[in-house]
Amino acid sequence: MSKLWGGRFTKDTNELVEEFTASIEFDQQLAIEDIEGSLAHVQMLGECNIISSEDADVIQRGLYKLKNKIELGGIEYSVANEDIHMNIEKHLIDEIGPIGGKLHTGRSRNDQVATDMHLFLKRKTVELISLVDDVQQAILNQAKANVETILPGYTHLQRAQPISFGHHLMAYFWMLERDKERLIDSMKRIDVLPLGAGALAGTTFSINRERVAELLGFDSIYPNSIDAVSDRDFILEFLSISSIMMTHISRLSEEMVIWSSEEFNFIELDDSFCTGSSIMPQKKNPDVPELLRAKTGRTYGNLIGLLTVLKGLPLAYNKDMQEDKEGMFDTVKTVEGTLKLLAPMIDSMTVNHNSMKKAVTEDYSNATDLADYLVTKGMPFREAHAVIGQIVLQAIQEKKYLLDIEYAVYRGYSDLFEEDLYDVLKPENVVAARDSTGGTAQKQVRKQIELAETKILKKKETV
């Protein structure tokens, strides 16, 4: 039999079965991780005298040759060899002869593939943390430039209260900060070595798992061999974190689409992040944020897909678990691409200060401050709320804004009003008045920007 596992079989694998069950089309992305795991494994085998040191050296040299070929794109993969592990082992045997068959001593593809995915996600998580930093820095750059820029804040997509645009942007900084903290914390579950668990029950060989963990840079090893080969929590956690992060990015993307519309005209995206229409020459479409918004659905689907695969599996390894990889690879690619686009798109966007100022002076988002003004004069808030509601209604009917209402009209509603009410209603004063910790007052926004810069530096030192 040509299969490396074919000793007990009397027939070749059906070609359709071979194609259906093979994973090499996608798990070849684990080639370098597979080589790295094998290098550490064979070094341990030699050190433990499970195979001779001479054999270990020959195998290692062969693996390094294969690694170089892989990096240069000089390796061809075969569906007949099913997966990345069997493909590399077959290439190794072709390279150095039957001695290459000793590499698989004391391990199974079950603990081998789990190790590869731990190594892959460990590397990618560190890279994604750095990319999140880049997006946060872009947000900080815009926030610092727009502390004094005022726009309407919204609830229910209705104008609510004037806020600092820098403050609004910083809300996304803190969302991404939590995402980054989740990625950092997930490293505790990723940084665990499964190799040495065998198929599910360990091995009869006197291996040294701690030595392999040391060679591969793992912080710890799985204490239970069954859990080691059947655990995919670390992938589920990554998919979950990615889904939450993409939710945050989708919300920001939605706002960028809205803000860049002619109806809002709050920002203009750089031409390099937009496209035109094949029929309407005037169009400038925000395709990038629209696609970022849409790709969120991919990450959700990958999470739900793996949850569904795992929900009914008995211990330990099952072929179903081959379905853990494509969704993981796709989510890594999606999030990676998203973050790489998002940072320069935010950095390069133009803020239309005049449009924001016009919007905030032609609405009633300063009404709450007028109610608060009456409260400071001694009127109960509920009564003040009703009085200002009546004034807003009159203003709407007369097509005026609160700053346009004559002083005598205000006095007609309450003799608590004094001429300083017009200072209270100015948008810049409305923003500055919210000076509570975490508020939109310019002083508070600058404080949170300073805190944010400290956190970015601290996280970079931690990872």
Image (cartoon, helix red, strand yellow):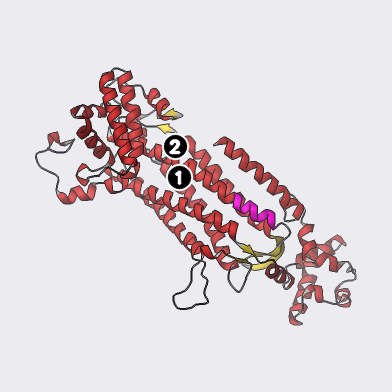
- Figure disc tally: 2
| Pick the front one: 300 or 282 | 282
Quadrant occupied by the C terminus: top right
Residue lying at the far top in this picture: please name it: 49
* Residue under the image location 55 percent in, 58 percent down: 345
Q: Which residues are magenta?
A: 137-146
Q: Nearer the viewer, residue 165 or 206?
A: 165
**Magenta-span inclusion, residue 242:** no
Q: Secondary structure at mark 1?
A: helix
Q: Residue at x 62, y 70 (%)?
A: 265
Is residue 230 among what the camera can see? Answer: no
Looking at the rendered structure, the kind of residue marked 1 is Phe
Q: Quadrant of residue 215?
A: top left
| Circles 2, 1 touching at the beta carbon (< 8 Å) | yes
- Please, what is the three-letter code of the amino acid marked with disc 2? Ile
Q: Position of residue 411 (x, y in %)?
A: 89, 74
Q: Is residue 108 above or below residue 78?
A: above
How far apart are the alpha carbons under marks 2 and 1? 9 Å
Q: Is residue 311 left or right of residue 400?
A: left
Residue 43 pos. (x, y %)? 33, 24
Residue under label 2, please give it. 190
Name the side, left or right, on which 376 lies relative to 96. Answer: right
Label 1 crowd (10 A; few <14 / some 14-19 / many >=20): many
